[in-house]
Image (cartoon, rainbow, N blue to C red):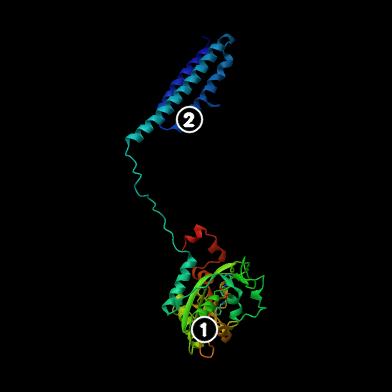
Amino acid sequence: MTDAAADIESGLRALSESFRERLAAADDEPSMRAARAEVLGKKGELTKILRGMGKVPAEKRREIGERVNAVKAEVEADFEKAVTALARRRRQADLEGRPEDLTLPGRVGTPRGHLHPLTRVKDDILDIFASLGFAIGWGPEVELEENNFTKLAFPPDHPATDMQDSFWVTVEGGEPDARVLLRTHTSNVQVREMMANEPPMAIVSGGPVYRRDDDITHSPMFHQIEGFLVDENVSFGHLKGVLTEFAQRLYRPDTPVRFRPSYFPFVEPGAEVDIGCVFCNAENGSRASCRVCKGTGWIEILGCGMVHPDVFEHCGIDSERWTGFAFGLGIERIAMLRYGIPDIRLFFENDPRFLAQF
Ligand code: FA5
């Protein structure tokens, strides 16, 4: 045999021997694949050995070529055998190992759900009024124009009654003249309860309402709470007392509360209630830069007033004898203030990363 052919021959022998050793030392499939690539890969050991092929005389080349193919086939066969044996060993170890008990409880535990933040805030508010003696009332979300606007003394041309402001509903087979809409506030509960019951009464009710609004503080569907009390000799003083107590139980016992004159067609006089800003209370001296109250120190939380005599009359209640107060607030607004939420839309996207924070 020529020197070059002999060199190749001894190189091939050394290569198959060292491959077997590497296979035996490998204890997982990736290391076996790596060993095979070191031998057969493009830049592997076999390629290096074959560089000497040019010096092998032509008559010897065929023989050496066959020998190379045989070594390649040997390497592949050894590799396959080793991988199969490894899989068999693993399977056997599994079978002989401790059996898995599929009935064991999971390690992480099943995550528990919780109430939506708006439901929590609604329940907290209703609880406060219930503890002050108010009963829980109800009104429908799809309502007659009469109960949503007319009986509440909205003039027919009030902007809220406009097609552009409210969601009107067509009722197939309904009364031809009955105009129906998605209620724009929970004040329809006042009308329904006053028509159905004799005073005295004190009622709160919460639920969804709908308006054509859509921005970071206004949503087309949102939630309100309505409350009203009807009795003899009810005064604005009673209204102030109840709502001040409410605000101080909801926030802090020393929360400042102020009543500002305002207009709603169904109350006279009407007011809006502001509380001292809970984000920049004077102690931390950050008022001027507060984005929530815009530096005023006050945040509006609800509308209220003394029930207008016209509303009593529309609902069949003697306005000479009975007096009362009513109030309405937006639940999202209270929740945004309580939790520091900057965008109302987060409440309705059902993103678990948001909801898990409550
Ligand atoms: C009313 O809806 C009156 N019915 C409240 C009332 C009841 C006054 C009884 C007097 C007596 P107003 O339109 O201001 O009032 O709405 C009340 C609250 O609902 C607002 O203060 C605000 O917090 C919330 N609100 C109004 N529009 C939206 C909206 N699109 N998205 C979220 N909250 C809203």
**Horizontal and vertical percent for residue 39?**
50, 25
Q: Secondary structure at mark 2?
A: helix
Ligand 1, image quadrant it occupies: bottom right
How far apart marks 2 and 1 lie (CA) works out to: 83 Å
Q: Callout 2, which amino acid?
A: Arg
Residue 132 rendering spot, x and y as whole percentages: 43, 80
Above or below, 237 against 164 in this view is below
Nearer the observer, 261 or 236: 236
Could you tell me if residue 264 is visible in this image?
Answer: no
**The label number, if any, that marks residue 325 in the structure image:** 1
In the image, taking residue 116 as reference, residue 104 lies left or right, namely left
Which amino acid lies under the numbered mark 1 shown in the image of this protein? Phe
Q: Are the residues tagged 2 and 1 within 8 Å (C-beta)?
A: no
Q: Secondary structure at mark 1?
A: strand
Q: Is residue 270 left or right of residue 204?
A: right
Which residue is located at x 57 percent, y 8 percent? 59
Residue 201 visible, this angle: yes
Marks 2, 1: nearer the viewer: 1
Q: Residue 121: percent from the left, percent from the top?
A: 47, 70
Mark toward the start of the polypeptide (2 vs 1): 2
43 and 78: which is toward the camera: 78
Q: Is residue 35 left or right of residue 54?
A: left
| Residue occupied by mark 2 | 33
Say few, some or many: other residues with alpha carbon within 10 Å of mark 1 (under 14 / 14 to 19 / 20 or more).
many
Q: Position of residue 46 (x, y in %)?
A: 52, 22
Q: Answer yes or no: disc 1 within 8 Å of ligand 1.
A: no
Which sits in the foreground, 11 or 265? 265
